[in-house]
């Protein structure tokens, strides 16, 4: 973060970080409060280390971090992560088509486990399949690695599908309050009919009319392997976004020694700061590796979600995209050599 970006951020949050002076002590000024919080987020240093660096009490640092993270989220979310409208979805779909060669795509979805210390008296509530305690960041990401929608706070013991169906994001999709555009034709393929806007995800999520996941299995026909490759190529942006997030904010490199509520505030603050920096930098700078690989992830209508069994309409939507990706209108020249790479000739 540059000095100019820090000053811009300070001007936005300073009114909410100003404290009244008393007869006993002068308040900590907003600039120092913001510096303490950013130091914690960017380094992951302990509260003890930061307290010694700023000559503050350990409990004071803890309070400052929690309060400043909440202020960052509340003051920046309407500007850098607004509730998506139809125009935003259309712009996102256009960017996915231009950059990742997948039309009608309005985002890539995945979850990230944020490792925390075991909360007192929580039993196995936060214990995940990796053998650690965590809260989950469920994120929908656009084609340029910005977070469109995030849902934070689900305990690590829950399944990805369960987290999605119970999340505010899933409920908003269920009620139709996210202003998703109407179905439209794929480019140069009107014969396939109008298809809904879709979100790309991995096999941890259920197949729905608006949620595409790969074909399961190993020995798949060539056309299904091409579909899985094209889907993975677009879905990779969410994993790249998580990588950028954890490299920029190195608090994610360590186990968070905080309560789950404070962990939620930290995650939301880093997500909104991520978007702030992406927009401030014009999306330039170091980009993640975009080599053609399909790494595993961490993690109809949604109405009537009863497990991972797909409806006939959801299967039809996926099959239509498969046909499109293997047609002259929708194929890319490198897809067949890529999916056949390493196979015996």
Image: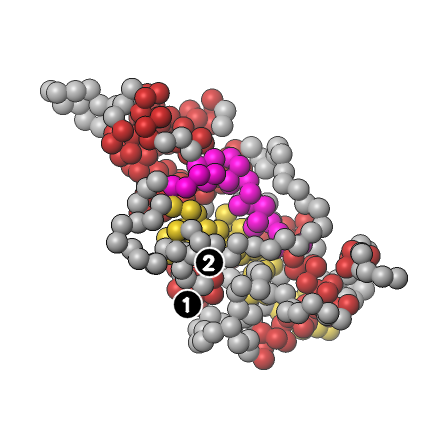
Q: Which residue is mark 2?
A: 129
Residue 157 versus residue 30 in the image, above or below: below
Q: Is residue 91 visible?
A: no
Mark 1 Cα within 10 Å, few/some/many (few <14, many 20+)? few
First in residue order: circle 1 vs circle 2: 2
Asked whether the beta carbons under mark 1 and mark 2 sit within 8 Å of each other, the answer is no
Q: Is residue 248 magenta?
A: yes
Q: Is residue 263 magenta?
A: no
Range shown magenta: 233-256
Instruction: Measuring from the top left, give residue 90's x and y in whole percent.
Output: 57, 55
Q: Is residue 212 left or right of residue 18?
A: right
- Camera-nearest label, 1 or 2: 2
Numbered circle sitting on residue 175: 1
Q: Residue at x 17, y 23 (%)?
A: 21
Which image quadrant for residue 303? Answer: bottom left
Q: CA distance from mark 1 to mark 2?
A: 31 Å
Callout 2 secondary element: loop
Instruction: Measuring from the top left, give residue 148's x and y in whole percent.
Output: 49, 50
Q: Residue at x 39, y 56 (%)?
A: 127
Q: Is residue 205 left or right of residue 24?
A: right
């Amino acid at each position: 973060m540059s000095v100019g970006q820090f000053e811009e951020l300070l001007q936005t949050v300073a009114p909410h970080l100003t404290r009244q002076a008393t007869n006993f002590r002068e308040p900590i000024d907003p600039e120092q409060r913001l510096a303490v919080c950013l130091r914690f987020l960017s380094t992951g240093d302990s509260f003890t280390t930061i307290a010694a660096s700023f000559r503050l009490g350990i409990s004071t640092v803890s309070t400052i971090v929690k309060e400043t993270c909440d202020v960052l989220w509340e003051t920046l979310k309407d500007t850098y992560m607004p509730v998506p409208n139809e125009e935003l979805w259309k712009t996102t779909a256009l960017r996915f088509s231009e950059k990742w060669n997948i039309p009608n795509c309005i985002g890539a979805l995945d979850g990230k486990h944020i490792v925390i210390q075991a909360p007192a008296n929580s039993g196995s509530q936060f214990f995940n399949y990796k053998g650690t305690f965590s809260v989950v960041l469920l994120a929908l990401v656009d084609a340029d690695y910005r977070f469109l929608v995030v849902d934070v706070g689900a305990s690590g013991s829950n399944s990805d599908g369960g987290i999605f169906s119970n999340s505010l994001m899933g409920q908003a999709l269920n009620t139709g309050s996210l202003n998703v555009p109407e179905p439209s034709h794929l480019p140069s393929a009107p014969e396939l009919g109008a298809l809904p806007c879709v979100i790309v995800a991995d096999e941890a999520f259920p197949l729905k009319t608006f949620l595409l996941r790969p074909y399961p299995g190993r020995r798949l026909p060539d056309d299904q392997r091409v579909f899985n490759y094209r889907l993975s190529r677009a879905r990779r942006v969410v994993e790249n976004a998580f990588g950028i997030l954890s490299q920029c904010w190195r608090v994610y490199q360590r186990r968070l020694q905080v309560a789950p509520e404070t962990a939620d505030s930290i995650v939301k603050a880093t997500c909104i700061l991520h978007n702030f920096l992406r927009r401030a930098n014009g999306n330039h700078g170091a980009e993640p590796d975009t080599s053609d690989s399909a790494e595993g992830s961490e993690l109809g209508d949604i109405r009537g979600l009863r497990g991972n069994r797909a409806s006939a309409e959801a299967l039809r939507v996926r099959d239509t995209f498969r046909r499109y990706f293997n047609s002259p209108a929708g194929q890319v020249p490198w897809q067949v050599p890529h999916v056949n790479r390493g196979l015996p000739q």
